[in-house]
Image (tube, rainbow, N blue to C red):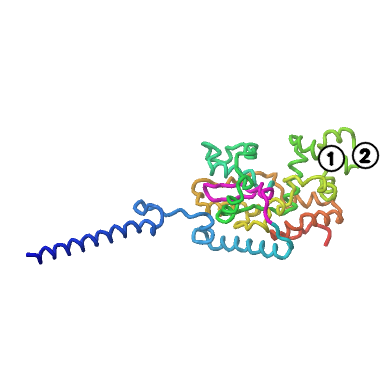
Amino acid sequence: MRKPKANRMVFALCLGCFFMVIFYYNTLKPASEPTGDKSSGQKTRRSPLQTLYDGDQVEASVQAVHQGRRELLEEACHAYTRKRRVLIPEDLKHVIVDDQHGLLYCYVPKVACTNWKRMLMVLTGVAGTHRDPLEIPANEAHVPGNLRTLSEYTTSQINQRLRSYLKFVFVREPFERLVSAYRNKFTRSYNTAFHKRYGTKIVRRHRPHPQPEALERGNDVSFEEFVYYLVDPATQREEPFNEHWERVHSLCHPCLIHYDVVGKYETLAQDSRYVLQLAGVDDQVSFPTSSKSTRTTGDMAAQFFHNISPFYQKKLYNLYRMDFLLFNYSLPAYLKFR
């Protein structure tokens, strides 16, 4: 009579062990599975940086173009920069942060930065109900505090974002950007603040026998006088360049920050679409297409440089030389020095 009882005890013990193994396995299973609801068909959302280096979401030819730009930039940094230094918060004031999508964007004035700021306002929800970036007034896009910059974070938060976020910048042929800045800030009647702050100073320093009205208003600065102002050593000793004509390498520090995407103004639409694809938002928002016929071109820049002597052309090129070298822009054919 004892034997069947012993068998029952062994059976109960085995059954208990079996359930314990099942329970233990089930407690481990969630930790080994990826996040995301498989039953609903949703996949784990990859960061833009993961998407970039996985390379399966974008055409191979597009990936190759941007890989080539990264490599050229890295080579130029090694070739033309000697001293390496540590980034400080002051270096990061132009780097806008989108924590929702894992993006860091260094904005460069006169390189479609208004539209990129509008885009980020839409993506981060700052724009409220606006889904079309062009619905946001241009002046609102530049209001300080609308978008956070990397300089506002702690050191550990900065390092974490530099490691894990997609970093991108848009650049432009340096002299076209410079002419565009001059046209916008010195030839438009509404830019009285620039006329007062910079125009009056330029007239006072670089115009022989200026008229009292020009000294007071500073609204008729010629491009030649603007060039004299830029290459004058006293200008940079006095204060840093205004961001509209500051060099890209001084604004965005491409040899200290490893940019994953270097977009170009010359291929603005394609490169902007590429960034939005990497961020996984290309089906939600589109980069605004420019319809302006007044935009500064290479031919227009050539006209402005026509009256600049070879001596001052060379001094100006030396000033912007690093931007030409780092971003693979050739010496413009219209320059008279070689």
- Give the crowd class for mark 1: few <14, some 14-19, many >=20 residues within 10 Å: some
Circle 2 SS class: loop
Q: Which mark is residue 209?
A: 2
Q: Quadrant of residue 204?
A: top right
Query: Residue 312: x and y, percent?
Result: 85, 53
Q: Quadrant of residue 214?
A: top right
Q: How many marks?
A: 2
User: Which one is in front, 196 or 307?
Assistant: 196
Q: Identity of the amino acid at label 2?
A: His
- In which quadrant of the rendered image does the C terminus lie? bottom right
Q: Mark 2 or mark 1, which has the lower sequence index?
A: 1
Which mark is drawn over residue 174?
Answer: none
Q: Which residue is mark 1?
A: 201
Mark 2 Cα within 10 Å, few/some/many (few <14, many 20+)? few
Q: Is residue 277 left or right of residue 38?
A: right
Task: Give how far across and how far down residue 277 sits, in percent.
Answer: 52, 53
Q: Residue at x 39, y 59 (%)?
A: 32
